């Protein structure tokens, strides 16, 4: 018997069978996954999405980023998997009622360990809670289901005020977050992801990326900066909008910027 539960736009599955019969021969639970179709933006008569191509077949895993179900209930880690969509590993969690979910696997979380959602005292790796209940100086990830989710990422809780908490992100920025923001203890697994060796150009093509053509080497019909003549124009994008001195960050964010990251100066 398989029953899907829709809670706060997240996907869960309630399975009443035994664990061995479900995971035998195939560790992937099909109701928690969905096959992705390759969309490259070529079906409108023109190139809508440049530098995007066909990627290999992928299966998307629905991951519980919010961690709000079954507060103060222990969930057991059944297995860990490699997710082709993201750089971090994921873990399959089983709750006492027979509910299965995927979560981001923090480092040092092994098979057989237990985690707690909405824990009153988050002391173990993988426990989730609000920033109000974390102690200062700890490493946290999956902040507000948006920040510190890639491989090896984390943030440091600097201090807590009356209604806000100051966090230091991986980029060096200091940001204020509300104390009711949900986060998880520890840092994300697969911290050596940046050391991977791609080795060949075909590996990047498998990921759905195509080569980038310089605008100056295009024709005038393809780009404002194309053509034989050079100089006399500021760098623009394909729509003719100037690239320099233009804000690129989103205006509305869930946090308040305290200090920006400091860029390293290049040696002359």
Image: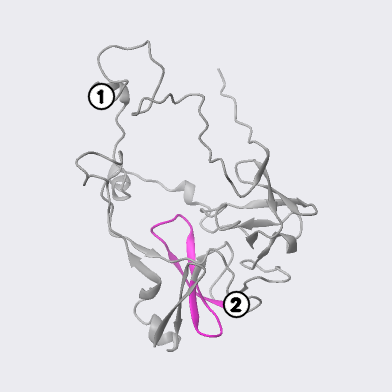
Position of 268 with respect to 23 (left or right) is right
Q: Secondary structure at mark 1?
A: loop
* Marks 1 and 2, how far apart at CA: 56 Å
**Against 141, is 11 above or below?**
below
Position of 91 with respect to 118 (left or right) is left
Name the spot of residue 215 as percent of width and height, x first.
31, 25
Figure quadrant of residue 243: top left
Identity of the residue drawn at 63% across and 36% down: 261
Q: Is residue 28 magenta?
A: no
Q: Residue furthest right?
A: 162
Q: Residue furthest left?
A: 45
Name the spot of residue 138 as percent of width and height, x first.
71, 57
Front residue of 222/150: it is 222
Query: Can you identify the residue that label 1 sits on?
Result: 218
Figure quadrant of residue 2: bottom left
Identity of the residue drawn at 36% across and 45% down: 198
Q: Is residue 99 magenta?
A: yes
Which numbered disc, 1 or 2, marks the residue that appears first in the sequence? Answer: 2
| Residue 70, numbered label | 2
Q: Quadrant of the C terminus?
A: top right
Front residue of 165/246: it is 246
Q: Which residues are magenta?
A: 74-101
Is residue 185 in view from this perspective? Answer: no
Figure quadrant of residue 259: top right
Name the spot of residue 21 as percent of width and height, x first.
39, 87
Residue density around tag 2, few if under 14, some if 14–19, many if 20 or more, within 10 Å: some
């Amino acid at each position: 018997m398989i029953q899907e539960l829709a809670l706060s736009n997240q996907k869960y599955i309630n399975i009443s069978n035994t664990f061995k019969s479900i995971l035998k021969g195939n560790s992937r639970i099909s109701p928690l996954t969905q096959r992705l179709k390759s969309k490259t933006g070529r079906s409108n008569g023109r190139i809508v999405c440049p530098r995007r191509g066909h990627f290999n077949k992928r299966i998307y895993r629905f991951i519980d980023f919010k961690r709000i179900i079954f507060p103060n209930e222990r969930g057991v880690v059944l297995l860990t998997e490699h997710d082709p969509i993201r750089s971090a590993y994921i873990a399959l969690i089983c709750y006492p009622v027979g509910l299965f979910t995927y979560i981001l696997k923090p480092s040092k979380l092994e098979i057989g360990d237990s985690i707690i959602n909405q824990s009153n005292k988050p002391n173990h790796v993988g426990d989730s809670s609000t920033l109000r209940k974390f102690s200062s100086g700890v490493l946290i990830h999956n902040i507000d289901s948006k920040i510190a989710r890639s491989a090896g990422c984390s943030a440091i809780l600097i201090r807590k005020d009356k209604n806000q908490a100051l966090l230091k992100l991986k980029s060096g920025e200091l940001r204020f977050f509300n104390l009711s923001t949900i986060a998880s203890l520890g840092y994300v697994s697969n911290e050596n992801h940046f050391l991977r060796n791609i080795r060949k150009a075909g590996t990047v093509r498998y990921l759905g990326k195509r080569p980038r053509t310089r605008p100056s080497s295009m024709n005038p019909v393809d780009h404002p900066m194309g053509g034989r003549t050079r100089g006399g124009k500021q760098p623009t994008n394909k729509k003719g909008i100037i690239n320099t001195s233009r804000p690129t960050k989103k205006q509305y964010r869930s946090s308040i910027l305290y200090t920006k990251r400091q860029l390293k100066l290049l040696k002359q």
